[in-house]
Image: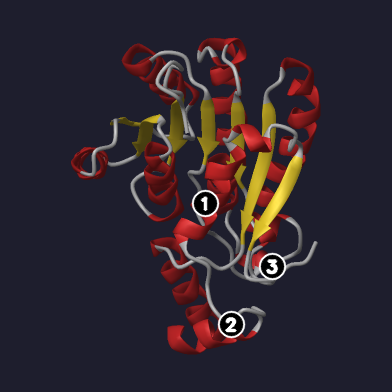
């Protein structure tokens, strides 16, 4: 939390209209951040901004395609013009994608990599160069990766590859920016109940010739806590990483997974 004499920090959150991104936007807003969020759909951005403002949070947003450098440059300009220098960047936007590797199209592979990995690089570079983050105190970059970024996922080669790369990028950048006092960490969710999780279950059900309920039962059986994590639980770790108490945590990939992965 900020004090009355401190400027309120600015957080930029991608994919902020549903699932983990929405929970992160709400968590950071409740912690006193001014939040600028984005998503691809104008109606969703507008509705989410209205909903969070109704909760008493200071939120603005814009449409952006994280696969496009031009779109991300416009996003950063809009965020800075609206709230000032960015203190916290949360690279959350992502997509699922996979299937039997022999049948994966070039289009699917490139879209998963562009959405989940290249966007993290493009937006982080833009924020470093034009977002003002290098001039603020307590600056944070937090990338939403996955436990799939630490172990292989059956029928998920593009997704797992992209998230492994996000973890590697995070660790390298964390060491690079440490002298500047900017911490860089990855949060690695396991199975989290989100709209994307439902799409993943449907994809596995189709590939395996079973039902989504059976897929969910199989997934939950692998989790020591026996349940999916919630978006709010993931957002709670993101919130902690923005705090001053987390100032010595950097270049790490931290799990929120119910014990699914102990690595």
User: Residue 248: which quarter of the image?
Assistant: top right
| Mark carried by residue 149 | none
Q: Which residue is mark 3?
A: 153
Residue 47 in picture, x, y percent from top left = 20, 43
Q: Residue at x 44, y 36 (%)?
A: 13
Q: Earlier in the sequence, mark 2 or mark 3?
A: 3
Residue 33 in picture, x, y percent from top left = 41, 30
Q: Earlier in the sequence, mark 3 or mark 1?
A: 3
Q: Decide which of 251, 170 is in the foreground and name it.
A: 251
In the rendered image, the quadrant that contains the C terminus is: bottom right
Query: Would residue 209 be seen by someone viewing this image from the given angle?
Result: no
Asked if residue 205 lies left or right of residue 138, the reply is: left
Q: Which residue is mark 2?
A: 226
- Mark 3 or 1: in front is 1
Distance of mark 3 from mark 1, alpha carbons? 25 Å
Q: Decide which of 21, 160 is in the foreground and name it.
A: 21
Binning the other alpha carbons within 10 Å of mark 3 as few (below 14), some (14 to 19) or many (20 upward) gives some
Asked if residue 8 lies left or right of residue 152, the reply is: left
Residue 70 in picture, x, y percent from top left = 44, 20
Q: Which residue is mark 1?
A: 236
Q: Are marks 3 and 1 in contact (CB under 8 Å)?
A: no
């Amino acid at each position: 939390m900020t004090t009355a004499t401190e400027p309120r920090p600015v957080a930029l959150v991608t994919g902020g209209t549903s699932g983990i991104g929405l929970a992160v936007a709400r968590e950071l807003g409740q912690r006193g951040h001014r939040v600028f969020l984005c998503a691809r759909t104008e109606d969703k951005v507008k509705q989410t901004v209205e909903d969070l403002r109704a909760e008493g949070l200071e939120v603005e947003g814009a449409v952006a395609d994280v696969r496009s450098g031009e779109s991300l440059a416009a996003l950063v300009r809009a965020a800075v013009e609206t709230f000032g220098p960015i203190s916290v960047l949360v690279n959350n936007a992502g997509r699922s994608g996979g299937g039997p590797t022999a049948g994966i199209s070039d289009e699917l592979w490139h879209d998963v990599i562009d959405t989940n990995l290249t966007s993290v690089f493009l937006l982080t570079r833009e924020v470093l160069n034009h977002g003002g983050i290098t001039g603020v105190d307590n600056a944070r970059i937090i990338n939403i990766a996955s436990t799939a970024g630490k172990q292989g996922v059956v029928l998920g080669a593009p997704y797992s590859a992209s998230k492994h790369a996000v973890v590697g990028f995070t660790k390298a950048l964390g060491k690079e920016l440490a002298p500047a006092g900017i911490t860089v960490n990855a949060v690695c969710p396991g199975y989290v109940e989100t709209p994307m999780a439902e799409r993943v279950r449907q994809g596995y059900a189709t590939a395996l010739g079973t039902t989504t309920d059976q897929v969910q039962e199989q997934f939950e059986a692998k989790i020591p806590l026996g349940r999916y994590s919630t978006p709010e639980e993931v957002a709670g770790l993101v919130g902690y990483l923005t705090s001053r108490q987390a100032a010595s945590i950097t270049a790490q990939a931290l799990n929120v997974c119910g014990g699914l992965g102990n690595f």
